[in-house]
Amino acid sequence: MNKPWRVDVLQCRGSSYEVGQQMAEGFLKTTRGRAYGRRKERKPFAFSLKNAEAALSTWAPNIWEELHGLADGLKISLSRAVAEYSNSRLRYPKRGCSAVMSGGLYGRNYDYDPRRYDRILIAAQPKGVHASIGFCERFTGRVDGMNEHGLCVGLHMVNPRNAEPGLVCMLIVRIVLDQCATTREAISLLRRLPHGQPFNYSLIDASGAAAVVEAAPSVVAVREGDQLGCANHFILPALQAFNRRNPGSRRHLPALEDFARRALPENELFRTLNDSLSPVFDHRYTSGSGTLHTMVCVPAQRQMLVGVGGDVSAERIDFAAWVHGAALGVEALTGQLGVEALTGQLGGNAKPLDARLRMVLGQTAEKPDKVFIGTPLDGALFKDLVLARARFANVSLAGAAFDDIDFSGAAITANCNFRGMTIAGVSVADLFAAYERQQKST
């Protein structure tokens, strides 16, 4: 079956207080907003209104003012608004995200738990800070976006542990959008901000200057270049100790870097990221990391291609025109998240053939009969199968077992890791060694 997927689009202008109030009032008109009154108040452990005010007054006074408008618009106390929608101690579940910065474009997939997704794209023009458009989290935060100067930024969780006192990820993205016009300014600010958790921040500006800021509570390092990919692990040596085991992120990064080297045009980049068979489109919805939205920004033109779900037609938003008073022309983004009853897998038109293997069938001449792309198959059992035209790309087969399989015509490249693998009881390492000895003797 298919599940309709809707993201509401809100437009707010005025003082920071008025933006907060408009955001709340717009939200209350949505389906989810009408159920808001039934929500119980969630007060995080060791919450301090005084400490939250001190942090926001120092780094983002406009957000502190916005929270007052948000509280009045939602008809809740300021204490509750600050506790739930600012720099609180609420837990942030794992999320995985992919970004490409190349050829003056910013491409991005946001992967997260559908049940915790705010489903709001907001264009905001508060007085005193830069106007921006982005996907919001807990109203005041942003997970990604672009501002009126063309600066784009997105967050990428690296390790939910190792948390220390500091600013939370979605407020950091928001602060960068509010206060910075260029990648250079964003890097400088990200070096000064107190980071509460290890995150990557992907950046590009209107000039095409791109960077990935690898940030942890105790250290911040920067990767710069014309063709960059960014996933959910640190690359620079100074931050290796913060990485967690994340095979999905390590599978995604080579594909992202390949997209960057190819310098795809905007429409093709969107299709490449949003294709449900893409090696960077994530189907792990039940574990909280499925692809929810795709966006491609053209910073020099202040335009955005955006879509929700997989295999969707992109909606083009002219943010430059909106900044000068025009309407966005869209009230909601809609898509279909395909749901497979066996696994709960969501995402575009891709359907799992088997609950264990999650195969995807392709029937065109350009595609093999069976495609395994970016799918974890660790520990899987392959038995009585013909894999003569199968294609495995960016897949982990660690611990998998193959029994009575026809591999005729299969090709295995030198990029594969054969450590510990055996064929008919003989280790692959021994087979390679014997082959090398045989080659030397001839």
Image: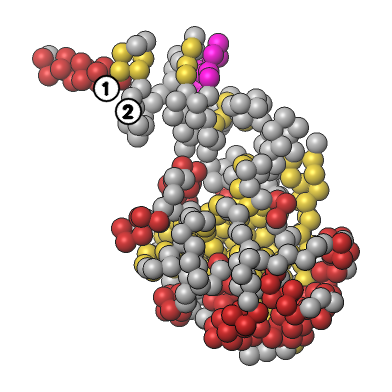
Per the rendering, the mark at residue 147 is none
Q: In front: 346, or 245?
A: 245
Kind of residue sitting beneath label 1:
Ala
Please indicate whether residue 382 sits to the left or right of residue 324 in the image: left
Please indicate whether residue 380 sits to the left or right of residue 34 in the image: left
Residue picked out by circle 2:
419
Q: In front: 267, or 187?
A: 187
Marks 2 & 1, CB-CB < 8 Å contact? yes
The residue sitting at 53% across, 24% down in the picture is: 380
Say whether residue 381 is visible.
yes
Quadrant where the C terminus sits is top left
Main SS of the magenta part reads loop
The residue sitting at 37% across, 68% down in the picture is: 219
Residue interval drawn in magenta: 381-390
Sequence-wise, the earlier of marks 2 and 1 is: 2
Quadrant where the N terminus sits is top right
- Report the residue that reaches farthest toward the left: 441
Q: Residues within 10 Å of mark 2 (few under 14, many from 20)?
A: few
Q: Residues within 10 Å of mark 1 (few under 14, many from 20)?
A: some
Give coordinates of residue 11: x percent, y percent. 76, 75
Q: In front: 361, or 28?
A: 28
Q: How many marks?
A: 2
